[in-house]
Image (tube, rainbow, N blue to C red):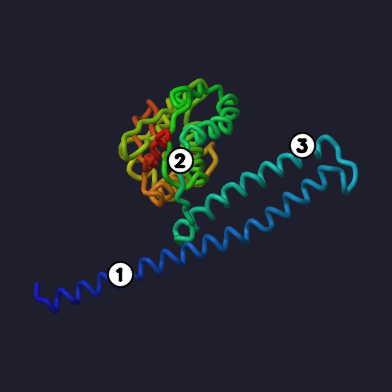
Amino acid sequence: MRADELEVTSDALRGKIIEAEASNRVKAEFLATMSHELRTPLNAIAGYTQLIDMGVRGPVTEAQHLDLSRITRSQRHLMGLINEILNFAKLEAGTVLVAETDVDVREILTGTKEMMAPQMDRKKLRFDVSVLDGLEGSPLAIRGDEDKIRQIVLNLLTNAQKFTPEGGSVEVGYDSDETSVSIRICDTGIGIAASELRNIFEPFVQVNPLLTRSTDGVGLGLAISRSLARAMGGDVVAESTLGSGSTFTLTLRRATVAAPAADA
């Protein structure tokens, strides 16, 4: 290929890249704007529903209390979906700020265990976080944003809880070396077919709608989790066998622990 032809091809490629980036920005800005516009009336619905339920507008019957509680649950569900879309839009637009701190692995796992235990109990799932015993007094820490790391672990645990049938189990484990720490979420759920596994981190993808129709979400949790992990220099990967469960692994940089000062 001649130099002039190569230059034309290079210019065309740059043009396509610029065009794709502009398209992504427009899409992300649209999602962010729509999410904000939808949150405003939903917040109003929540406020007025609470006022009515409290009896501020007059006496409320038991049947009306029941209906109001259903309205509240629906409002919270919709708000959760909108927040998920808004978070993804921010990631796509590159407006999410990621802190650089040392985050204690035990604190992250302890906090997420407390938040997830009630949901696991309601579904009669065995929730094994015995890994915390091995972290007792451990200086093991990862480098990243504490809130974002907690969000990723919660997303992965929620995903495992959703797709694990009653009576199954969800187990948390970890591995570490000199440079990285990996947190594993293993479940005995429905699993993912090999043909679908490569697509699960794509936005708005839900594995087998016939199996997932009864679950919440719009298929953004895994996409958000992977994007956040990569923004912190790590990654989220998955292994699965259809009908036998899945393992999702979050890997992040290990924090450097300073050596204790020598006695004077």
**Is there a contact, CB below 8 Å, between mark 3 and mark 2?**
no
Which label belongs to residue 16?
A: 1
Locate residue 174: give its quadrant: top left
What amino acid type is highlighted by mark number 1?
Lys
> x and y percent of residue 163 in the render?
47, 32
Please give the name of the residue rendered at 55% of the width and 27% of the height, measured from the top-left corner. Answer: 120
> x and y percent of residue 214 in the render?
54, 36
**Is there a contact, CB below 8 Å, between mark 1 and mark 2?**
no
In this view, the mark in front (3 or 2): 3
Image quarter (top left, top right, bottom left or bottom right) of the C terminus:
top left
Residue placed most toward the observer, 99 or 247: 99
Q: Pointer 1: residues within 10 angstroms few (<14), some, or many (20+)? A: few
Please give the name of the residue rendered at 41% of the width and 37% of the height, measured from the top-left corner. Answer: 261
User: Is residue 171 in view from this perspective?
Assistant: no
Please give the name of the residue rendered at 24% of the width and 75% of the height, measured from the top-left corner. Answer: 11
Residue placed most toward the observer, 132 or 194: 132
Q: Secondary structure at mark 3?
A: helix
**View extreme (right): residue:** 58
- The residue that mark 3 highlights is 66
What amino acid type is highlighted by mark number 2?
Pro
What amino acid type is highlighted by mark number 3?
Leu
Q: Give the CA separation, mark 1 to mark 2.
A: 34 Å
Please give the name of the residue rendered at 38% of the width and 41% of the height, measured from the top-left corner. Answer: 256
Q: Give the CA separation, mark 3 to mark 2.
A: 30 Å
Q: Pointer 2: residues within 10 angstroms few (<14), some, or many (20+)? A: few
- The residue that mark 2 highlights is 209
Identify the mark nearer the N-term, 1 or 3. 1
Q: Give the CA separation, mark 1 to mark 3.
A: 55 Å
Locate residue 54: give its quadrant: top right
